[in-house]
Amino acid sequence: MNTKKVWDEVKGYLFMLLGCVAYALSTSVFLAPNSIVAGGVTGLSVIINLLNERIPIGMISIVINLPILALGIRFQGWKFILRCLLTIVTLGVVTDIFAVLPTMTSDGVLASLYGGLCQGVGIGLFVKYEFSSGGTELLGRVICRFIKVLKIPACVAILDGAVVVLGAIVTKNPANMLYALIVVFVSAKVSEIVLMGLEKSKLCIIITDKGKEISDTLIQRSPRGVTMLNGTGMYTDKEHDVVMTCVKNRQLTQLKAIVKEVDEHAFIIINDSVEVRGQGFQSLSE
């Protein structure tokens, strides 16, 4: 048996547990005590708990997710559904265990910020290690199989939005919708950081008549690789060199200075790179 594969699998389950802890803290310590409904099955569970405090939030979320998992078996396969089930049960149990912890803040905005932060860590870890907590995301996938005009993000947004509006009605607090937006925004940003890291990169495409000189200078002054392409300007019907390279944010100023020094008439296109793997960046095996 491959030791690395076993360790990777074990590491995945450990980070899934850590993700459940982070997500459960968001619900039990920040959102639920402040009656903040941020959408999803967890938000629906919070609403039911607000109507009947004797029913634990974690247990409600497990019960609601079971029929969703049953619907998803046909489209997602047993392996994915079993991993979902493990995550859902773990998250539900940890959420109810953390329900005994004291509320950290009674300020709605702060609770939304901290709740979104913890939730983002949880979601980021789930996605990074290929786990899923089911909920509206899985339900949205199933619904889109039958309603072809809907895309998955739109379907999930509709489901989450309905839960948020219902939460505002049940709590009789329209501000809940603002709090939900804060949670969603912060959660999305934090989960992106968990997935991609803090180090951002830029894809730079340089159109120039001095491609060799620019490439040589870049290679001499920075450790980044450079790729030379051939291009034709369709307006002038003239051939140009196209230099392509990827640099980290902190190296961008140096790159622009080098290009300006060699060819001040060069044309530079700079794009954000969602993810860069390979030599000089994150390893392909990570």
Image: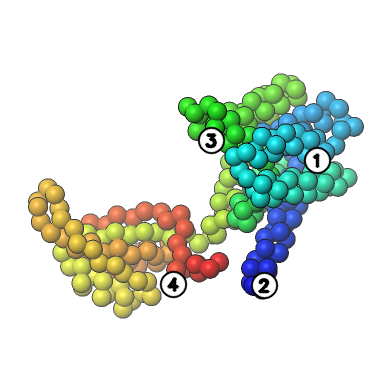
Q: Residues within 10 Å of mark 4 (few under 14, many from 20)?
A: few
Circle nearer the viewer, 3 or 2: 2
Query: Rounded to the nearest whole Å, what is the CA distance between mark 3 and mark 1?
Result: 25 Å
Q: Which mark is residue 152?
A: 3
The residue lying toward the viewer, choosing from 168 and 123, is: 123
Up-down: is 217 above or below 101? Answer: below
Comes first in the chain, label 4 or label 1 = 1
Q: Amino acid at mark 1?
A: Gly
Up-down: is 286 above or below 154? Answer: below
> Which quarter of the image is occupied by the N terminus?
bottom right
**Dots 4, 3 in contact, CB < 8 A:** no
Question: Which residue lies under the disc numbered 1?
Answer: 58
Q: Which mark is residue 170?
A: none
Query: Rounded to the nearest whole Å, what is the CA distance between mark 4 and mark 2?
Result: 29 Å
Q: Residue at (24%, 70%) from the top-left corner?
A: 214
Question: What is the secondary structure assignment of the residue under circle 3?
Answer: helix
